Amino acid sequence: MAAASDLALVQGMAHTRTTLRAWSREPWQVLRGWLLGALAITTVLLLAVWLIGSWLTPDASLAPTFPGLTGRADLGTVGEVLMRNALVLALHGFACVAGFIAGSSLPLQAEQHSGLYRKIHDRAGPLAIAFVVAATSFSLLTQALSLGFGAANLAARGDMSVGLLLVGLLPHALPELVALFLPLAAWVIASRREDWHELLAATFVTVGLAIPVLIAASFVEVYISADVILWLRG
């Protein structure tokens, strides 16, 4: 058991190093796919937020706290925004790691077993992948509902349409969401190609790229977005 796990770990790390070296030769080709995928997910989410927010009956008294509009705008708020986004990024990063384990490590371990142990390992991979898909889909659905509800109430409090509010949020929301969805885009691309062995490398790269973008987006959200919204409202 231990030997099989050790072998899977060694081979997994070898695949990761090989993948990183291959990507370093043509970084833009890899990054372009992730960016387009993340942008597509972001677009779908924002459209869902707009539709939900426009459909719901708003209640201005339930408007969420937003820096500079209904709440304070300071470094403490930046930290709160970063913490919230870090949790979402961690969830999406873990989805990548889970995909690597389920699609790459478990099959390698299964090859070292026979009988019941092999059947368990063979079935564990697809089940784990299905769980990741279900958990991620649930996360996106709850995000759309929560953001749509918040957008409807905040727009009502500001006496503006949900669409106009979302336009005002784009300067921070667009880069923020694209950064958050980079790991998911990498997961989708790898799963379609069945390149599960690339997902550990994808986790390192996408999370590393997302962190500075999220930091910058947090400052924009706290110190700039409120002014943009107020300017659009007139």
Image (cartoon, grey):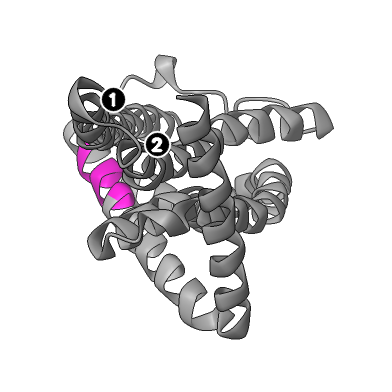
Question: Which residue position is annotated with label 1?
Answer: 58
- Provide residue 36's location: percent of width, then percent of height: 38, 70
Give, as a three-letter code, the residue at label 1.
Pro
At 62% across and 74% down in the image, what residue appears?
21
**Is residue 99 shown to the viewer in this render?**
yes
Q: Which of 22 and 211 is in front in this view?
A: 22
The residue under the point 56% across, 29% down is: 87
SS majority, magenta = helix
Q: Is residue 217 magenta?
A: no
Secondary structure category for the residue under label 2: helix
Residues 14 and 207: in front is 14
Residue 179 quadrant: bottom right
Whole-percent x, y for residue 70 in the image = 60, 26
| Percent x, y of residue 82 | 67, 35
Residue under label 2, please give it. Answer: 155
* Quarter-of-image position of residue 56: top left
* 46 within the magenta span: yes
Q: How many marks can you see?
A: 2
197 above or below 26? above
